[in-house]
């Protein structure tokens, strides 16, 4: 018993000060990538061919933009840009409300609009989520599990993962949706009572991630499920997930930094 | 006595594919079966389509006590006599061959799909083996009060998908059948079609908790095929990353085991300390799981002197915090009583099934690639192999705890003694028509990447064997006689990868 108390004392309180305190990331942390069009010399079309992913997109007007949803946050996606126009910032805020908001040509973080008043009244202070991994590598799931540890302690915001879809308010989908999981994804979704949210976590769920184009996967969340929150990353840092959820629930301002 | 000495096959030393003997099927079977009787072990057994329309079946074997590797192959048509009746550890490999190559191993006692999908390497015009529940009957017990419990693929928690079918009598499990494949993403095909170095992004995603292990094994194979020599500094950085990954996962598992038996203090403390190991990997690589670090030719990130000092002090602080928590949990009589005798894998079962890693070492089978087939840093710096004898949940817990302590000591030494030099060299083009076996001791156990190049030096076949592929059979073997309610604990003590198995 004495040992127990001594250990408890020594361990102290380790919960992250998020969202009130500073969130510190090491120098090499690869957060939201930023594109500096002023540095781009030869037009991004050339660089696109050397990219390991589809993170760099060129619009019909010839302007380059970054698709955070397709980005694997690999060092190569920055280093392959010949003119050094792409760099990773240390900003962990990546989530967006709409898929197209993940495609950005500015250096600002995408916005997450809070849920409408009625849904927010229902879920704002208590949200129960059901996780389904479907053709993932288990990286995103590991970070979702980490949200429950004493550091991130997601439950202090009223958000919890539950065992049964019947007890859930929303589906958290990870993975590129393998053929074998397609049916299970739909059946879990249908088992969640309405109104229900869908949250796509990680590059795989958003566009297939490193498995994009494999005949065994559907390149992410099925088109007929309406997604309420997109959280990019490979895998997203737990604070990236938490930041997106809290902004969706209206517990934090919609726009990062505001 | 079986010997493959003349081949010159070693961990990460590539040889011409033509040097691997192509035997008639019957001699191939005899060679493999005899080798297994002589204490060799199947590292991989897989098929690869041959130019002549046949399938090349290649067996890679290891003799761990003597640190040897061997390979033998055969060419087959649509069917061949199965190895499994003589060599049980081949059972899942042969099911995989049947599924990937549409070759039937005749006489296989349990020929069911592995990933229940159209064949990966199907020949043009062949009928794909579609998911067919009718042809996948679960093994069933009948009788009074015998009942069946089906779990999954969606589990009660944040867990990967898999289906577990229990035959039970009251609380007692009579039989457990595990059906996987839900995470199948076609990894091997992607590794074969994406070109290097970008294919490393797929290798990093084979199992998200084993980013360093799989990326190192894949890069080790590519470097051997390119005759690229890493600098001692690169080898040390990789060794450090690998042990950090082991530390993070083992500490996480100790916490998860504590959580499953409702021993909350250790669950909380270990859970937090796992995060500290991930944060160390993030300091090094920019990602909590070490993504972006391991690349052909070495590592993308160096450990500058200031970072080495910082890492060392954080590791020492971690060691000081870990010790009391480990003792708090493992010296507690009620914890020991709860873990003892649950989920026992007998020593002989371990040998028959060809288990690897923590699961094998907990059955007093001291298999460890770092010790048996050393490579990179582990040729110069040794970590003692940790074993236990009982083969139960307690033994697997103790092996993890010992490995946590030894890896920590090793890490504290290594970050203080980084050799000079560059951290990456150019890798160069791959040799044509060669075969390489790249083994890595990931935190779960032996990771094997076997790569064969074609005449133009492109990757023709990239076979991945995650330790989970060997070890899932052990979970099924450990359950009979236990209570159903002990399954989560038993499963957690193995903590196998679904993604790594399903590929």
Image (cartoon, rainbow, N blue to C red):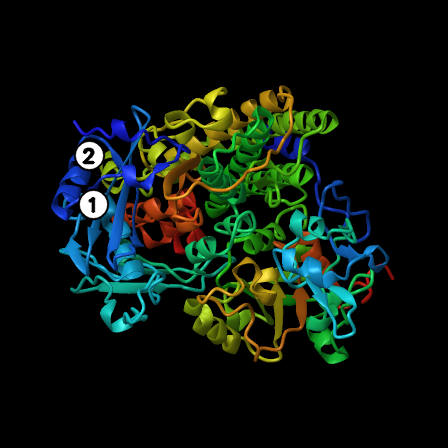
Q: Chain of mark 1?
A: B
Q: Earlier in the sequence, mark 2 or mark 1?
A: 2
- In the picture, measured across the screen, residue B271 lies left or right of residue B351, that is right
Q: Chain of mark 2?
A: B
Separation of residues labelled 2 and 1 (CA atoms)? 13 Å
- Counting other residues with Cα less than 10 Å from the Cα at mark 2, is it few (<14), some (14-19), or many (20 or more)? many
Which quadrant of the figure contains the N terminus of chain A?
Answer: top right
Q: Is A248 in front, or is B11?
A: B11
Q: Quadrant of residue B245?
A: top right
Rendering quarter of residue B318: top right
Q: Which residue is mark 1?
A: B88
Residue nearest the viewer, comparing A137 with B214: B214
Residue B79 in the image: state x and y as whole percent: 17, 58
Q: Is residue B344 visible?
A: no
Image position of A98 with respect to B450: above or below: below
In the picture, measured across the screen, residue B450 lies left or right of residue B53, that is right
Mark on residue B450? none
Looking at this view, is B141 or A210 the one in front? Answer: A210
Q: Position of residue A154 (x, y in %)?
A: 66, 55
- The quadrant in which the C terminus of chain A is found is bottom right
Residue behind mark 2? B35
Q: Is residue A191 left or right of residue A76?
A: left
Instruction: Give the structural element (helix, strand or loop) at label 2.
Output: helix
């Amino acid at each position: 018993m004495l040992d127990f108390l001594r250990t408890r004392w020594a361990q102290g309180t380790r919960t992250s000060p998020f969202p009130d305190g500073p969130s510190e990331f090491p120098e090499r942390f690869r957060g939201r990538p930023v594109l500096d069009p002023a540095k781009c010399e030869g037009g991004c079309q050339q660089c696109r061919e050397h990219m390991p992913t589809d993170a760099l997109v060129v619009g019909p007007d010839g302007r380059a933009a970054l698709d955070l949803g397709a980005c694997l946050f690999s060092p190569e996606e920055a280093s392959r840009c010949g003119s050094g126009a792409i760099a990773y910032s240390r900003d962990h805020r990546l989530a967006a409300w709409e898929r197209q908001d993940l495609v950005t040509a500015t250096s600002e973080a995408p916005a997450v609009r809070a849920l409408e008043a009625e849904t927010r009244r229902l879920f704002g202070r208590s949200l129960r989520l059901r996780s389904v991994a479907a053709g993932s590598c288990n990286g995103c799931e590991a970070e979702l599990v980490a949200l429950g540890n004493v550091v991130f302690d997601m439950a202090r915001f009223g958000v919890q993962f539950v065992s049964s879809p019947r007890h859930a308010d929303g589906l958290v989908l990870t993975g590129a949706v393998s053929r074998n999981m397609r049916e299970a994804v739909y059946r879990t979704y249908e088992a969640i009572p309405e109104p229900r949210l869908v949250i796509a976590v990680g590059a795989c769920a958003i566009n297939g991630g490193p498995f994009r184009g494999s005949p065994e996967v559907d390149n992410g969340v099925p088109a007929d499920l309406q997604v309420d929150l997109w959280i990019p990353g490979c895998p997203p840092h737990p604070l990236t997930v938490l930041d997106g959820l809290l902004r969706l629930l209206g517990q934090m301002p919609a726009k990062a930094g505001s | 006595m079986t010997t493959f000495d003349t081949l010159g096959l070693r961990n990460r030393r590539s040889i011409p594919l033509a040097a691997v003997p192509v035997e008639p099927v019957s001699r191939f079977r005899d060679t493999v079966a005899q080798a297994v009787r002589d204490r060799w072990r199947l590292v991989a057994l897989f098929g690869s389509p041959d130019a002549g329309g046949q399938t090349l079946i290649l067996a890679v074997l290891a003799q761990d006590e003597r640190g040897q590797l061997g390979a033998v192959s055969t060419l087959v048509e649509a069917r061949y006599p199965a190895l499994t009746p003589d060599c049980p550890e081949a059972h899942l490999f042969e099911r995989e061959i049947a599924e990937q190559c549409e070759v039937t191993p005749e006489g296989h006692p349990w020929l069911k799909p592995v990933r229940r999908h159209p064949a990966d390497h199907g020949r043009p015009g062949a009928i794909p083996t579609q998911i067919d529940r009718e042809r996948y009957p679960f093994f069933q017990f009948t009788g009074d009060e015998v009942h069946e419990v089906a779990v999954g693929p969606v589990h009660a928690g944040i867990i990967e998908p898999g289906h577990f079918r229990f035959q039970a009598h009251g609380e007692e499990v009579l039989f457990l059948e595990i059906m996987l494949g839900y995470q199948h993403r076609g990894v091997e095909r992607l590794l074969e079609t994406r070109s290097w170095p970008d294919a490393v992004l797929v290798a990093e995603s084979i199992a998200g908790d084993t980013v360093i292990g799989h990326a190192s094994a894949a890069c080790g194979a590519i470097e051997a095929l390119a005759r690229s020599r890493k600098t001692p500094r690169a080898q040390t950085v990789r060794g450090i990353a690998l042990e950090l990954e082991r530390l993070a996962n083992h500490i996480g598992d100790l916490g998860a085991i504590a959580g499953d038996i409702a021993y909350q203090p250790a669950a909380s403390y270990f859970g937090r300390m796992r995060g500290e190991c991930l944060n160390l990997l993030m300091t090094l690589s920019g990602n909590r799981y070490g993504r972006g670090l391991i690349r052909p030719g070495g590592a993308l990130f160096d450990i500058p002197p200031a970072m080495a000092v910082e890492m060392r002090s954080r590791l020492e602080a971690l060691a000081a915090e870990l010790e009391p928590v480990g003792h708090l949990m493992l010296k507690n009589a009620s914890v020991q009583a709860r873990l003892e005798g649950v989920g026992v894998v007998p020593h002989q079962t371990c040998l028959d099934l060809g288990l690897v890693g923590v699961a094998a070492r907990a059955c007093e089978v001291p298999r460890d690639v770092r010790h048996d087939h050393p490579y990179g840093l582990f040729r110069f710096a040794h970590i003692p192999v940790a074993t236990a004898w009982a083969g139960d949940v307690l033994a697997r817990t103790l092996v993890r705890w010992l490995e946590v302590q030894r890896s920590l000591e090793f890490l504290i030494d290594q970050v203080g003694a980084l050799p000079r030099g560059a951290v990456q060299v150019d890798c160069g083009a791959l040799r044509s028509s060669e075969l390489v076996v790249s083994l890595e001791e990931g935190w779960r156990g032996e990771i094997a990447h076997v790569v064969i190049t074609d005449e133009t030096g492109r990757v023709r076949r990239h076979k991945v064997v995650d330790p989970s592929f060997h070890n899932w059979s052990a979970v099924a073997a450990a359950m009979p006689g236990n209570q159903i309610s002990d399954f989560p604990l038993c499963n957690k003590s193995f903590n196998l990868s679904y993604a790594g198995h399903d590929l």
